[in-house]
Image: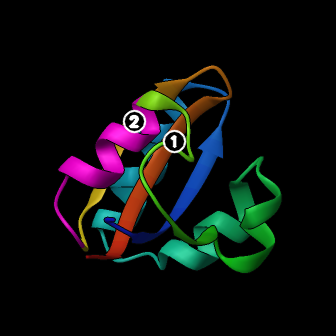
Amino acid sequence: MAQATARHILVDTEAQCNDLKKQIEDGADFAEIARAHSNCPSGRNGGDLGSFGPGQMVPEFDKAVFNGEVNTVQGPIKTQFGYHLLEVTSRT
């Protein structure tokens, strides 16, 4: 079965998500942005979600993790929790 490791940043608005994505694309550190801005408890760990398989996350998030590019910041991804920036760090 496929496995992925990923990190994410969860915020309330699409505008904030886009702003943080631009900061990362301009060279800001993903983990530092996650620690400073993420609403998810994983933010304390730089947004690290660890390893997981298909179906363990909400469908919108799952689709991005298992279909998007590895080591590329994806988002905003809207879920019932808010807006996510996502970076898949590995996938098998």
Tell me the crowding category of disc 1: few under 14, some 14 to 19, or many 20 or more residues within 10 angstroms, Cα based.
Answer: many
Say if mark 1 contacts mark 2, CB within 8 Å.
Answer: yes
Q: Position of residue 12 (x, y in %)?
A: 67, 29
Q: Position of residue 29 (x, y in %)?
A: 48, 79
Disc 2 residue type (three-letter): Pro
Separation (CA) of disc 1 from disc 2: 5 Å
Is residue 34 one of those drawn in magenta?
no
Q: Which residues are magenta?
A: 60-70
Which residue is labeled 1 in the image?
A: 84
* Residue at 58 percent of width and 77 percent of height: 31
How many marks on residues?
Answer: 2
Q: Earlier in the sequence, mark 1 or mark 2?
A: 2
Label 1 secondary element = strand
Tell me how the rendering is colored: rainbow
Which residue is labeled 2 in the image?
A: 76
* Residue at 70 percent of width and 53 percent of height: 38
Disc 1 residue type (three-letter): His
Is residue 66 one of those drawn in magenta?
yes
Q: Can you tell which quarter of the image residue 58 is in?
A: top right
Residue 61: mark? none
Q: What secondary structure do most residues of the magenta stretch adopt?
A: helix
For the residue pair 2 and 89, the one nearer the viewer reads as: 2
For the residue pair 67 and 53, the one nearer the viewer reads as: 53
Label 2 secondary element = strand
**Left or right of 92 in this view: 83:** right
Q: Is residue 69 above or below residue 54?
A: below
Tell me the crowding category of disc 2: few under 14, some 14 to 19, or many 20 or more residues within 10 angstroms, Cα based.
Answer: many
Q: Quadrant of the N terminus?
A: bottom left
User: What is the residue that sits farthest to the front in this orientation?
Assistant: 1
Q: Position of residue 19 (x, y in %)?
A: 45, 44
* Residue at 65 percent of width and 76 percent of height: 46
